[in-house]
Image (cartoon, rainbow, N blue to C red):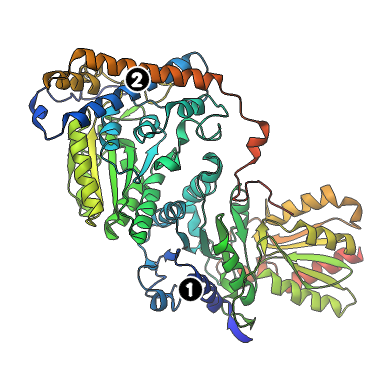
Amino acid sequence: MAQLSYRDAVARGIAQEMRRDERVVVVGEDIAGAGGVFKTTVGLLDEFGPKRVIDTPISEQAILGAATGAAMTGLRPVAEIMFSDFFAVCWDIVVNQIAKTRYMTAGQVTMPLVIKTGNGGGLRFGAQHSQSIENWAMAIPGLKVVTPSTAEDVIGLMAAAIRDDDPVIFCEHKGLYAAKGEVPDGEIVDTLGTARIRRPGHDATILALGMMVPRALAAAEDLATRGIDAEVIDVRSLVPLDTRTILDSVARTGRLFTVEENPQLLGWGAEIASLVADEAFWDLDGPVQRITTPHIPLPSADSLEDLVMPSAESVARTVEKALQS
Amino acid sequence: MRLPLAEHRYGEHGVVLPPERSDSNDALGIDLDTRRQLYRSMREMRTFEKRAYDLFMKQLVKGTSHLSLGMEAIAAGFGAAMREDDYTFATYRGHAHTLARGVPMTPVLAELLGRANGLMGGKGGSMHLTSVEHGMMGSYAIIGAHLTIANGAAWSAQYRGSGQVAVCFFGDGTTNIGAFHEALNYAAVYRLPVVFVCENNLYMEYTSIRDITAVAHPAADRASAYGLESIVVDGNDADAVHLAALEALDRARSGLGPSLVEALTYRHGGHSRADPGKYRPTGEVDAWKAYDPLTIYRERLGRLGVSEAELDAMDATALALVDAATEGAIAGELPSPESAFTDVWADGGWSWRN
């Protein structure tokens, strides 16, 4: 066991897979010589060389197109889109090409690639460098979408994503890069499509993703001091979605809250609320409540950004109020 | 400098005429067997495309289709120059490029008809023809995207040291989209074994390419920006295309990097099935139809000693192939309803949850 930062875990996860499979290559802007603008690929160039770790021009379509063509012909590329907001300039490659090619070719083409990206807010970067885009990606059939919240999960889910034969959008939360966690020694391989119960509880189920997980856990600790025992589930994987863990939890607690960083409309929690309404309605003791960023772009000023993103306090307040009403 | 659209009136623009017919290319160093193959290949494409059109008129081909009528020399000239394991990336105007890789006609036509025996079981259609086993890595229907993807296949070939080359065909309109420029720079920077082939048929969909492009040659005039040679070939002359293809493929295979070839051609019909092509001046259409790649090539083969009887026999063989494919396609079953739910994921299924 060792303490490892979330950002170092990214490089460790990729390196672990590059050592076992020479088809794994990494491309992106500033990812080789500079080790990534978020330092998530430090050491890869030194260990694996410029043939496998490649700095690119600022050409997001070219980067993802190259990863696509390489994946179609035998490599297993990991491509970086530096800020997830930049998906907007290469979304055609993701949506129309990567996601649909296997289907349109009736399975002739396999697309084993990972797009890793710095996602999420809280760093005072403003509206074009802070978005949470998981719900953009999960709307497209053919894409898998994961967001780890701990260093150990970063390694294990990165390994699972690289070994998976389908395209995976791997959202790294920028606000968690500096967070440290205990990580076991040796190879770590996780499973896509699995949620984790981070804190068991009886009174309410709180679903969270990415940086909202530590906030939900802090909220649960706060609620515990006031006699509310909340269960916190780290969703981790939106596609595939571990509905079993979620529905089982709702059956036990009777209340569901989602904590989402994305703007309100069509956030991932909306799909889960709909699912629970369809399949667990009679388990519910009250309405599902979604705690999201309001439907606004994220402001830059720290005071404003903190005001609009879900916080431990706002989560605790919402849950407490709902359970008391 | 001319401002192309300053006084634009739809359909009124300068006529671009084909080159004069001449026998000068008869002497190019291409053996007669290869030339027979080029003619056969073009005739198959021509006959196939005409049949696709007829079947559309009979409402058997649904959706849309973009025909290569008049543009066959490019697909044939490159097809005959490529190594069996080279990669083709085509656009939605990809029937001819698919046939050029040796994909049998029946599954191609059946795909246009949406049948279970179609190349992709009816899940792709006319605009997405793909046959990986033939190196036909797909037909792409979003302008520009597949240039970047061809780079990826070329990168993979370079990484694996396979000696394969990716050849990427696209229209003149593609030269004005960002992905074209990203892909060209990227290919040049990494010296990727890729050949970009601009099929300049003078019209970006319904608009003259000259009216909406700052340079006269939409591809070749941009080549220098990426350190590439400016190459323009007669895209209606299969021999000229074939030699340009051999040179570009050889260059790519020997590690010298990408090429950008602009092949001048003309489509005989409209952009897609919905377009009668009325925006094109009559004199221009007539001149290019007279400069038909099949007509000029048939004449060349005649001058080189191939008998009319042999040429007629090749035409008849092509027709028989298309007739058989038509029969096979029309006889094909409709896809099973279950097939709509396969091949989303590598496990064969479509489930997004447990």
> Does residue B228 show up?
yes
> Does residue B61 show up?
no
Task: Give how far across and how far down residue B89 sits, in percent.
Answer: 38, 42
Residues A173 and A226: in front is A173
Instruction: Using a 10 Å C-alpha cutoff, classify the residue at mark 1 as few (fewer than 14 neighbours), some (14 to 19) or many (20 or more).
Output: few
Q: Residue at x 28, y 24 (%)?
A: B40
Up-down relation of residue A179 to residue A160 (above or below): below
Q: Residue at x 36, y 22 (%)?
A: B270
User: The residue tagged with tag 2: helix, strand or loop?
Assistant: helix
Location of the N terminus of chain B by quadrant is top left
Up-down relation of residue A276 to residue B46 (above or below): below
Is B79 positioned to the left or the right of A151 in the image?
left
Pointer 1 residue = A19
Q: Residue at x 36, y 42 (%)?
A: B88
Task: Give how far across and how far down residue B327 sits, in percent.
Answer: 49, 17
Location of residue B75 by image quarter:
top left
Residues A172 and A302: in front is A172
User: The residue tagged with tag 1: helix, strand or loop?
Assistant: helix
